[in-house]
Image: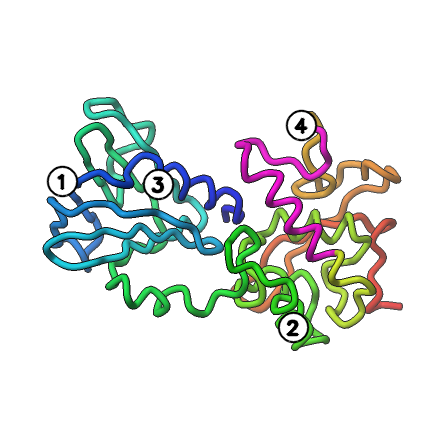
Amino acid sequence: MPEGDTVYRAARLLDRSLSGHRLLRTDFRVPQHATVDLAGSTVVRTVSRGKHLLTRIDGDQGSWTLHTHLKMEGAWRVHKPGEGWKRPAHQARVVLTTDDRVAVGFSLGIVELVPTAEEDSVVGHVGPDLLGPDWDEEEALRRLRAEPERPLGEALLDQRNLAGIGNMYMAELCFVSGVHPRDPVGSVANLPRLVRRGKQMLELNKERAVQSTTGDLRERMWVYRRDRSPCRRCRTPIAVAMTGPAGRERAAYWCPSCQPERSQD
């Protein structure tokens, strides 16, 4: 699933490409909105909220927000009129056409239109956004600490605590902090430092398409998707296991030597 910085870049792409432009055609290729036509309306802005995208549109039909979520396979691409799409047309879920741009949302996990005044109905549950103007470190820490026995990795992935961290950043944050993903939140000695590192990672990567947490684009990750490869610090093989609630398990990566599991002490 895309991380918060990936969604941030998608929002910036849509904002730069569409904002201030009148829509010549709209095509919502999902059953619940298949008959909606917002042609003639103007795109006001696109912003990210954690892993959610909000495209605000004003017109004679009122003020609407197109809420989309990339989930696992989704992506937004912007083309010039007449230019071939980089993904198959059958994957398109939304097509927004202006005079000089065609924005296509492929394989989107969520597509819904809500009145702009009711945006909270789709993102009101989301915690402080690591890349948003509403970032509040103390509130994020309060939410994390509310369940001290919860495994840290699971708590970091819960977008209700803080928004923007996915599997990759969870694994990398736990590694650089020397904490096992299954350790309880309450056992983490310096949780504020870990949260600040998370914000720093996303801030650094939001401006580049190739993510790195090591500072070296040739060796981009410490542990993520490096199972059985040697740890870059101690050469112990990286471990991987599925963790999390039943039905929502995620792959967690760690170094058994650099991140011993405290809950087994």
Residue at mark 2: 142
Asked where in the image residue 76 lies, by quadrant, the reply is top left
Q: How is the image coloured?
A: rainbow
Assign the C terminus to one quadrant of the image.
bottom right
- Mark-to-mark CA distance, 4 and 2: 34 Å
233 with respect to 68 (left or right): right
Q: Which residue is label 3 attached to?
A: 15
Look at the numbered disc 4 and give the secondary structure of its residue.
loop
Q: Label 3's element?
A: helix
The residue singled out by tag 1 in the image is 25
Residue drawn 75% across the image and 40% down it? 228
In the rendered structure, which amino acid carries the disc numbered 4? Leu
Q: Using a 10 Å C-alpha cutoff, classify the residue at mark 1 as few (fewer than 14 neighbours), some (14 to 19) or many (20 or more).
A: some
Disc 4 from disc 3: Cα separation: 28 Å
Residue that sits furthest to the top in the current view: 83
Q: Residues within 10 Å of mark 2 (few under 14, many from 20)?
A: few
Depth order, front residue of 237/5? 5
**Inter-mark Cα distance, 1 to 2:** 45 Å
Q: Nearer the viewer, residue 173 or 134?
A: 134
> Where's residue 219, x and y in %?
71, 29
* Magenta residue check for 81: no
Label 3 crowd bin: few (<14), some (14–19), many (20+), radius 10 Å = some
Q: Residue at x 65, y 53 (%)?
A: 170
The answer to which of marks 1 and 3 sits earlier in the sequence is 3
Mark earlier in primary sequence (1, 4): 1
Q: Amino acid at mark 3?
A: Asp
Q: Earlier in the sequence, mark 1 or mark 2?
A: 1
Cβ–Cβ below 8 Å for labels 4 and 2?
Answer: no
In this picture, is 157 found above or below 57?
A: below
